[in-house]
Image: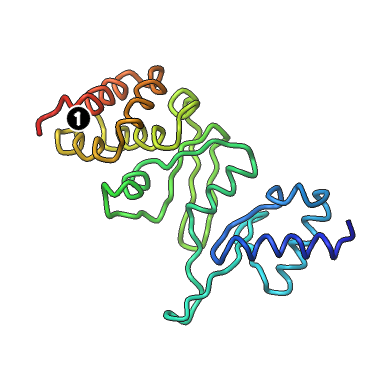
Amino acid sequence: MRAQGIQEKIFSRIKASGGGSIFVASDFNDLGNNDAIRKSLSRLEKTGLIRRVLQGVYEYPEYSPFLQEFVATSPHHIALALARNNAWTIVPNGDIVLNQLGLSPQVPAEWTYVSDGPSRRYILGKTTIHLKRTSGRDIANLSDKSALIVQAIKAIGKHRMDSANMRKLSSLMTDEEKFTILSEAKYITNWVYEMIKEICNGRFVT
């Protein structure tokens, strides 16, 4: 496929994904070889159609007519793109996972994730994306919801896990998701699994 054809196909896919989408070269591997894809992304950046937010990570900017400015880049979507590009498994950690689950309004300047890849920090303006290498057993072979609940329990902490927090976490899962996490999380950190059993079985004060 000629270079111009690859570039057109790449941009067509980018537009279809909508404003604010984040992508990396490997997202387009089915359209051509890696060198041609990277050159196409570089040309699209130079024309201003897309912008590079980190080395190898691009954004299709979303413009807000109401704010009359481009919407801020999502650190979470960047983290997902980095993980996708490197075949890492990542899960939000600390205050980030509590915020995503609606358990805390706090959004810190550092977006922290546990990962089965190397520990890395990425600077995005005033925001930092921190990927922390962790034990594979606490993130491996877990569905997305199970992984979030596990990290939420760890973020709250063993000694702060009261009936109110248990009730909130229980309300975030369907019966099917409770059945799934009880099956998937058998081999994670012991105290966390004990908490999961209490949450899923309703053994807390109502």
Give percent across and percent down for residue 138. 43, 26
Q: Which residue is drawn at 46% across and 37% down?
A: 114
114 relative to 204, above or below: below
Give percent across and percent down for residue 119. 54, 38
Q: Give the labeled residue for mark 1.
A: 159
Q: Residue at x 61, y 57 (%)?
A: 54
Query: 156 or 197, which lies in front?
Result: 197
- Tally of numbered tags: 1
Q: Which residue is drawn at 37% across and 47% down?
A: 96
Q: Residue at x 26, y 50 (%)?
A: 104
- Left or right: 36 with respect to 193? right
- Left or right: 163 with respect to 137? left
- Left or right: 52 with respect to 39? left
Q: Which colour scheme is used?
A: rainbow
Give percent across and percent down for residue 102. 29, 49
Query: 110 or 46, which lies in front?
Result: 46
Q: Quadrant of residue 116?
A: top right
The quarter of the picture where the C terminus appears is top left
Q: Residue furthest front?
A: 176
Q: Which residue lies furthest to the right in this view?
A: 2
- Left or right: 198 with respect to 48? left
| Label 1 neighbour load within 10 Å: few <14, some 14-19, many 20+ | few
Q: Is mark 1 on a helix, strand or loop?
A: helix
The quarter of the picture where the N terminus appears is bottom right
Kindly identify the amino acid type of the residue bearing the numbered disc 1.
His
Q: Residue furthest left?
A: 205
133 relative to 74, above or below: above
